[in-house]
Image: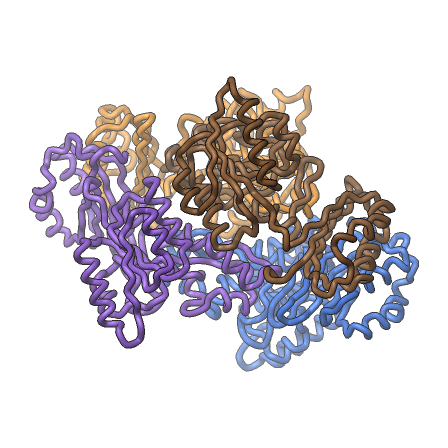
Chain colours: A orange, B purple, C brown, D blue
Amino acid sequence: MSNRHSATLLISCPDSHGLVAAIANFLLTYNANILHADQHQDPVENLFLMRVQWDLNGFTLPMDSFAAAFAPIAEKHNMQWQVSLSVRKPRMAIFVSKYEHCLVDLLHRYSIGELDCDIPLIISNHEDCRRLAEFHGIPYHVIAVTKDNKAEAEAHQWALLEEADVDLIVLARYMQVLSQKFVERYPHRVINIHHSFLPAFDGAKPYHRAFARGVKLIGATSHYVTEILDDGPIIEQEVTRISHRDDVEDLIQKGRDLERIVLSRAVRWHLENRILAYNNKTVIFD
Amino acid sequence: MSNRHSATLLISCPDSHGLVAAIANFLLTYNANILHADQHQDPVENLFLMRVQWDLNGFTLPMDSFAAAFAPIAEKHNMQWQVSLSVRKPRMAIFVSKYEHCLVDLLHRYSIGELDCDIPLIISNHEDCRRLAEFHGIPYHVIAVTKDNKAEAEAHQWALLEEADVDLIVLARYMQVLSQKFVERYPHRVINIHHSFLPAFDGAKPYHRAFARGVKLIGATSHYVTEILDDGPIIEQEVTRISHRDDVEDLIQKGRDLERIVLSRAVRWHLENRILAYNNKTVIFD
Amino acid sequence: MSNRHSATLLISCPDSHGLVAAIANFLLTYNANILHADQHQDPVENLFLMRVQWDLNGFTLPMDSFAAAFAPIAEKHNMQWQVSLSVRKPRMAIFVSKYEHCLVDLLHRYSIGELDCDIPLIISNHEDCRRLAEFHGIPYHVIAVTKDNKAEAEAHQWALLEEADVDLIVLARYMQVLSQKFVERYPHRVINIHHSFLPAFDGAKPYHRAFARGVKLIGATSHYVTEILDDGPIIEQEVTRISHRDDVEDLIQKGRDLERIVLSRAVRWHLENRILAYNNKTVIFD
Amino acid sequence: MSNRHSATLLISCPDSHGLVAAIANFLLTYNANILHADQHQDPVENLFLMRVQWDLNGFTLPMDSFAAAFAPIAEKHNMQWQVSLSVRKPRMAIFVSKYEHCLVDLLHRYSIGELDCDIPLIISNHEDCRRLAEFHGIPYHVIAVTKDNKAEAEAHQWALLEEADVDLIVLARYMQVLSQKFVERYPHRVINIHHSFLPAFDGAKPYHRAFARGVKLIGATSHYVTEILDDGPIIEQEVTRISHRDDVEDLIQKGRDLERIVLSRAVRWHLENRILAYNNKTVIFD
């Protein structure tokens, strides 16, 4: 698949008769060879959601004419939609602080082609991960963040993000809370990893609190960042078993394995245009 | 959903352009309100597989005319297809020997509406489960099976199954191997539970062999029965962790929980027309 | 093991040198054949916790003299301890309301010997499960509970529990909150199943709230009941995966499988004297 | 714990009365502060197995006199035993071929102190991972292996391993089969990762065969290498769910996450002296 050019269309709109037929007929008109299609109806919200991916080889509509050609259908059915081309790799920035396990993992996956994107930059509030970034040949920018310089620091970050034309920001254990302004600037485009099974233990020191509560499983949660801390749409969660023999350090160690896997799945699904977020929840298309 | 009448169409055919459009247009012609649709392309086998379920309320094609109306499309695309109506509950026979944990589980799920079917009879080669069957008001037939009377016993079983107009046979830890003739009579209509993670430990005494090998997880597998023992298309599998502290009895006990869950999922998916078997594998539609 | 008479000793005390030697020497003095031993040190609380089970065959100390013989060691090390004899089956009461899936499961496990106890009675605030109780030959008492008669109803329950000499009370989806008086009467002797991954979604309607939050896994938690709702020491937890395709009814159905397994594990471990609760947490001895 | 000096004793011997007392009394004689103790009885083989770890701070027996002092007890009870000191870090060699995901993972865990060992060298039959090894400052030796030079190549490997005084060899997706001579030289000291749920799909191309069989879960297994391929004592296993939507490439990708976790757990447990292998099985002490 990876060496074929394809397009992926994500759609959400009010549910009604004839939606699948309308989309399928449109694609057939231009001889699309559909590679994958998945749809979902939410009967409570009366929503129709769809992801369809087709081979551009043999597709007779030039993609720069797609929007104009698709507009009548989109308008008729009141669709929100976006189309992505495999030829244009998403551009991803990674934010990190001192813990480097998620960064190591993301960069390794990137290096072996598991994450199909470009990574034009890494931003950190510490020097710690510079050597790792350089090993992978990725520019590493240190921007210290304090209570007093937050607005300024974010302005600096935005300048870098814009210059790099970034589509997605991944917080790989970045230990600073983004401002509301920052979050609004990148709606459903900032992915965070929280080291608990949300909504349990949101906020600070989740492993310590899990230990204190005596839970028998710990978890990790990847989610889109919204203005409320640890409250955005959940993308993926996973848990692992602990016992009374595990102290807080053991929880932290076992948790690292969860964090890596849960964050990397969210990033991959986002890069593959598999996620539709609505109502503070996510649909993950297969 | 359960109190609406719906129809479910399962299709498999060679993949080609325009299949989704053809099916969607057909359903739209008769004003179908699609409740769920899921499809899968197998690029290796060049197969298209689809499950679509729609509300019969407002559907303008009488279902006794469906086959005739759909035939041109089916023929054009060389489809294998079947349509099921929610109003017609599938009829399920359960075969059991002495272990009753799967039977208890299936009958409880049946009694609370989790398995949407009728159970006209239970067949066993032992008396042990009669009281349980009677508690649920289900006729219980004991047909002893020996080396010498197998053909005769199966003839007796077939007579009962045919009289009861059975669609699906569930082997709930039934400890007799069905003859090839039996299996051919009910292709992809006999579901078995095997108490191992197939293909490991097929055949006899899987828990004892898992113990002897020192595995760290044990499993259970539900599958369609084919003429080769424990080799049919796998429907569902699950595992659970064991340790050196577990002896064979512990494996058997932990395994019972797996068997119940893995068998009941397979049965439910079959009853909901979610399974398409081909190439000795299964597609499970969401 | 089950057909041998054995004794199980549970100990907790401040940690110090020589504890294992003291206990091992004591048991050796009377020729104990140790079947299982497991211990745990909590370095934060400086606690030593131990479970040891030995064969009574060949043990030269009569068990009615055990307390007197063990007292000097226990006093010296400031031990809390209890000894249980396999010959004396624990007596368990089950409380249930209308949902019978946990009850079906517990009674089946009881009937095949998986739960080594006597069940002298079932108490319910509804008639619904009477037929099931009678199938298993267990007395079924209906005691309606309203806002106005709660004290009276509990007094009635206590009378029945005392008459039946009950050691353990299992709330198998019993939909009434026990009074603080009730809880204090049976410290660490009432086990509840809560249908969420605590501490997430404590209180009412956890499946509805899990659905609304858009979690990707749902859970169940068994715990000892304390005066604070859903806050007692957690005994066991398990989760299962859900997706955007699952509505609240699907969550409830998938959750039933979790509830059964999580509750039955807690009950079995309690009956086998494997649980030590302290600091609102539990140690589960292997 | 890590900044305290401790000793760990692993024992296996025929089970008999008084073993725990004998060991506990011995340690108490020299004022040992026991940090962890775990034991296991195998009633089928009549074996007693124990791991005990104690603080060397305050322990009055110099460790170079330990063997002589413990010998009478060991002889009396026919014990096989070994003692390890935390002050002496185990020395681990890693063998790798071209896939570097396990190597990346092990080196990262090593770099953050999760694996408490020294890694004096990495041996490979390819150049591919040299840059990664150098990033971590570990000598990287390329020894090509062909059908014709195998004995010679292994002799070269042995020379390097002996010069580096290696205790443990980890095959991190090393794609060459070791000779019987090699295996006999390092009994229970070579850990391999096999990319299937053994005993299913032993040998070559397990992901391809798992795909062909249509299993619903794939697994990975870490084990000690013995003279029979993929047949040694299993240390750890884990599985993950796949579906009909996953092609072989997806299995390989999902499997990488399993391989990393399953191999790293085995390595950590070995380094922490938690594993006792006997009868082609393992006991993993908590």
**Which of these two is toward me, B48 or A165?**
B48
Q: Is residue C252 left or right of residue D281?
A: left
Residue A247: x %, y % from top left: 70, 44
Residue C89: x %, y % from top left: 60, 50
Task: List the single residue furthest toward the top.
Answer: C148
Q: Residue at x 86, y 72 (%)?
A: D72
Q: Residue at x 56, y 60 (%)?
A: B216
**Which of these two is toward me, B121 or B177?**
B121
In the image, is residue D29 above or below residue B41? below
In which quadrant will I find the C terminus of chain B? top left
Q: Residue at x 61, y 48 (%)?
A: A135
Q: Quadrant of residue C23?
A: bottom right
In the image, is residue C30 above or below residue A128? below
Q: Is residue D141 visible?
A: no
Residue A88: x %, y % from top left: 40, 40
In the image, is residue C133 above or below residue A279? below
In which quadrant will I find the N terminus of chain B? top left
**Which of these two is toward me, C97 or D121?**
C97
User: How many numbered circles does the render carry?
Assistant: 0
